[in-house]
Image: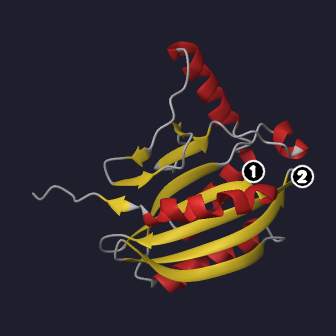
Amino acid sequence: MNIKNVILILVVVVIIAGIAFGINYLKRKELMFGGLVAQSELATDDFSVNLPKGWQRAEAGIGISAMAVNIEENVTDPAAQKINFKTYLAVVYDTLQNRTLGDYLQSAKNGLRQAVPSVVFAKEEELSVNGRPTFTLEAELTQQGVNFYVLMAMIKGEGDDVWVMSFNTVKDSWQEYKKEFYNTINSFTLKKQAEN
C-alpha cells in the first residue's frame, strides 16, 4: 500500500464514517450480547494502544488494521448527527518505501491536499513514542457539512514499516479529546515478532 492509498482510505473513512458501519456494528452487537462493554486496549497481533475511557473496538474496513469508536459519545452537531458520526480511531499499516519519516509526512500532506483541497493544517510535530520516531499532524476539514478535526500520528515501525493512527472528531470536540488522543498515541507499542 502506498501513502496515497493510505490517505484515500483515511479520507474515505472520515467521509463515510458517519460511522454508519460502526453504529450498525455496535447495534448488532448490542442486540446479540445484550449490551456493549467498553475496552481499555485496542490490540492486534502487531500492536496495542490504550483506549480512552468508554471506547469500543469497531469493525475495521478494508485496508484498516484496527478501529475503535467512542460508544458513549453524545454528538450535538446536527450535521454530524445526520450521518450518525461518532469520534473514532483508525490504524493503518504502510511502508516508507525507502523514504524518511519526514518525507512520508510531506506525502501525507500532499495526499490530503489532493483528496480534500480545503484542508487546513493546524500543527505538525516531531516526537518519540516508546523510542520510535513519530510525526503528528493536526488538520481541519469539512465533509458532508461537518467540520472535522483530524489528528494523524505516523510512527516508525521495524525496518521500512510505518503505522498511521488517525483520530477523527468534530471540530467542536477537539479540545475535549486532545489530551486523550495524544495519550493514546504515546501508549502505542509494537509487539515483538516471533523469531524463526
Count of residue discs: 2
- Residue with the mark numbered 2: 145
Q: Which mark is residue 33?
A: none
Mark 1 vs 2: CB contact within 8 A? no
Is 179 or 11 nearer to us in this picture? 179
| Element on which disc 2 rests | loop
Farthest-out residue, left: 196
Which amino acid type corresponds to the residue marked 1 in the rendered image?
Answer: Ile
Q: Is residue 167 left or right of residue 188?
A: right
Where on the picture, by quarter, is residue 111?
bottom right
Sort mark 1 into few (<14), some (14-19) or many (20+) by Cα contacts within 10 Å: some
- Percent of width and height locating residue 96: 43, 75
Q: Is residue 27 left or right of residue 93?
A: right
In what quadrant of the picture does the C terminus appear?
bottom left
Name which residue lies at 31% across and 48% down: 45
- Residue with the mark numbered 1: 15
Name which residue lies at 57% across and 79% down: 105
- Percent of width and height locating residue 83: 81, 39
Residue 5 visible somewhere in the drawing: no
How is the protein colored in the picture?
Answer: secondary structure
Which amino acid type corresponds to the residue marked 2 in the rendered image?
Answer: Gly
Q: Is residue 176 left or right of residue 144?
A: left
